[in-house]
Image (cartoon, rainbow, N blue to C red):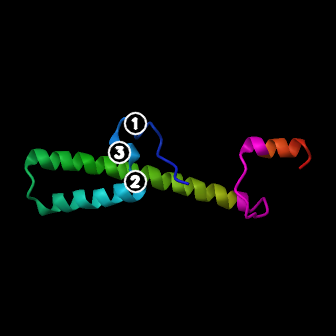
């Protein structure tokens, strides 16, 4: 399951928000390559730089989200037995606890 970066850093109307981590990373590599070639005009270079900055922020948001998910899984793994079933929502867990399940 993919978790998109927050809407604060990637507004829904921004095409960047639709990119997966891998897509954003690959585009960032392409942008850096174009900048390193040095063949772009000043205006093109500025636009590429700005796009690269946005892509880097987008990738960082993905990585922060992935780290948070791993941290949550690790902290949960130490307190609850592992199960092969899909995780339940907090409401389902609370209902199960109330019913004695």
Write down the residue under mark 2.
59
- Crowd tier of the residue under label 1, counting other residues whose Cα lies within 10 Å: few below 14, some 14–19, many 20 or above: few
Q: Is residue 16 left or right of residue 100?
A: left
Q: Earlier in the sequence, mark 3 or mark 1?
A: 1
Viewer-nearest of discs 3 and 2? 3
Marks 2 and 1: which is nearer the front?
1
Whichever of callouts 3 and 2 sits on the residue coming sooner in the sequence is: 3
- For the point 38% across and 50% down, the residue is 19
Q: Position of residue 100 (x, y in %)?
A: 92, 47
Element type at marker 1? loop
Q: Which residues are magenta?
A: 76-92
Taking the spot 32% from the left edge, 60% from the top edge, the residue there is 26
- Magenta stretch holds residue 79: yes
Looking at the magenta stretch, what is its main secondary structure? loop
Q: Which residue is mark 1?
A: 11
Query: Is 51 in the magenta?
Result: no
Tell me the crowding category of disc 3: few under 14, some 14 to 19, or many 20 or more residues within 10 angstroms, Cα based: some
Q: Which residue is mark 3?
A: 16
Alpha-carbon neighbours of circle 2 within 10 Å: few (<14), some, or many (≥20)? many
For the point 7% across and 50% down, which residue is it?
Answer: 41
């Amino acid at each position: 399951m993919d978790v998109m970066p927050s809407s604060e850093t990637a507004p829904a109307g921004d095409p960047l928000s639709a990119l997966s981590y891998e897509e954003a990373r690959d585009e960032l590599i392409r942008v850096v390559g174009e900048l390193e070639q040095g063949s772009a005009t000043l205006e093109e270079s500025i636009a590429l730089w700005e796009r690269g900055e946005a892509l880097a922020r987008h990738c960082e948001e993905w990585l922060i989200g992935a780290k948070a998910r791993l941290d949550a899984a690790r902290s949960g793994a130490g307190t609850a037995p592992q199960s092969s079933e899909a995780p339940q929502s907090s409401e389902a867990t609370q209902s199960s606890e109330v019913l004695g399940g």
